[in-house]
Each structure stands twice: as C-alpha cells, then as structure tokens.
Image (cartoon, rainbow, N blue to C red):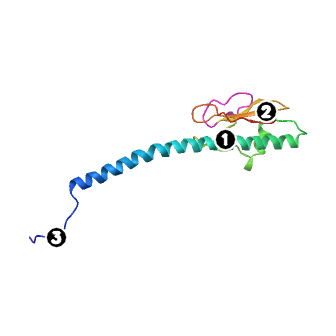
Amino acid sequence: MKERRGERGFTLIELMIVVVIIGILVGIAVPNFTSMQGRAKEASVKGNMHTLQLAMEDFSVLHSGTYPVAADKAAVQALFPSGAWPNNPFTGAPLADADITFDADPATQGQMGPNPANVGDYIIKGYGRSALLTLQLTSG
C-alpha cells in the first residue's frame, strides 16, 4: 500500500472537544427556548383575553350598553373573528364552550372568561402556564 505523507486528519481529542462544545451550546439553548415558548403561550392567552374583551364591548354596543352574562355566551362567540373561539395556545385545539368561564375563575391552561360577568361590568381573567394570570381586563 502506498503511504500518504503530509495529509493529516482530526485526532480523537479534537473531535471530543468539538462534541463537548456542541453539548455546552445545546445545554444553554434548550432551556432558553423552552422558557421562551412558555412566555409566548402566556402572551397568546393574554391576546385571546383581549379579543374576548373586544367581543364583549361589541356586544355592549349592540345591546344598549348592557354587557353579556353567561346566557349570552353564544352571542359573544359570534362576535369573534370567524365566529369561533380562539385556539388554546397550550394544546393547539380550539377552546370549547367549557373553556370560556363566565362567573368562575379559569382553572386550566389557556382558559379565560369574565368573572364576574354582570350586565353593568366585567373582569376578564385567564389561566397561564401554572396559575391565574395577573392581567385583568375590565370594563371600567
């Protein structure tokens, strides 16, 4: 066999150093990425809460200043873009009627609703990653 001279490949040590550096970079990036995903999902819940607020204000304009109560849930849903509840950012599935809680605090990720919902006022609350969101959108 002909022996090659002057050609040099990577040593095992050099390859191990590269693998360790890649491992360190992945170890830094993955937690930051998952944390950012969680914050983005909570921001989506807040966006959904704001859309619910707009729908409730539209309902009020259409009904002489009266805000919707639980019996008016379908009418509020009809005021959403495309007439449907938004998607739950944590599951990706559309929110069901049970996920829009009138007169009760939301208790599951992605849920939201007015509590209390009175004909004269409301407070919209949402549930984030692990707790009730502190953002409260009100009629006042």
Instruction: Kindly report the secondary structure that dominates the magenta region of the rendered protein.
Output: loop
| The N terminus - image quarter | bottom left
Q: Distance between the residues labelled 3 and 1?
A: 63 Å
Q: Distance between the residues labelled 1 and 2?
A: 16 Å
The residue pinned by badge 3 equals: 6
Residue 90 picture location, percent across and down: 58, 40
Q: Residues within 10 Å of mark 2 (few under 14, many from 20)?
A: many
Looking at the rendered structure, the kind of residue marked 1 is Lys
- Residue 50 in magenta stretch: no
Q: In which quarter of the image is residue 55?
A: top right
Residue occupying the far left of the picture: 1
Q: In this view, does 122 lie above or below 81?
A: above
Label 2 vs 3, first from the N-terminus? 3
Label 1 vs 2, first from the N-terminus? 1
The residue pinned by badge 1 equals: 46
Q: Is mark 1 on a helix, strand or loop?
A: helix
Q: Distance between the residues labelled 2 and 3?
A: 79 Å
> What span is in magenta?
98-110
Q: Quadrant of residue 37?
A: top right
Residue occupying the far right of the picture: 64
- Residue 103 in magenta stretch: yes
> In front: 16, or 90?
16
| The C terminus - image quarter | top right
The residue pinned by badge 2 equals: 122
In this image, 6 relative to 25: left or right? left
Looking at the rendered structure, the kind of residue marked 2 is Tyr
In this image, 132 relative to 3: left or right? right
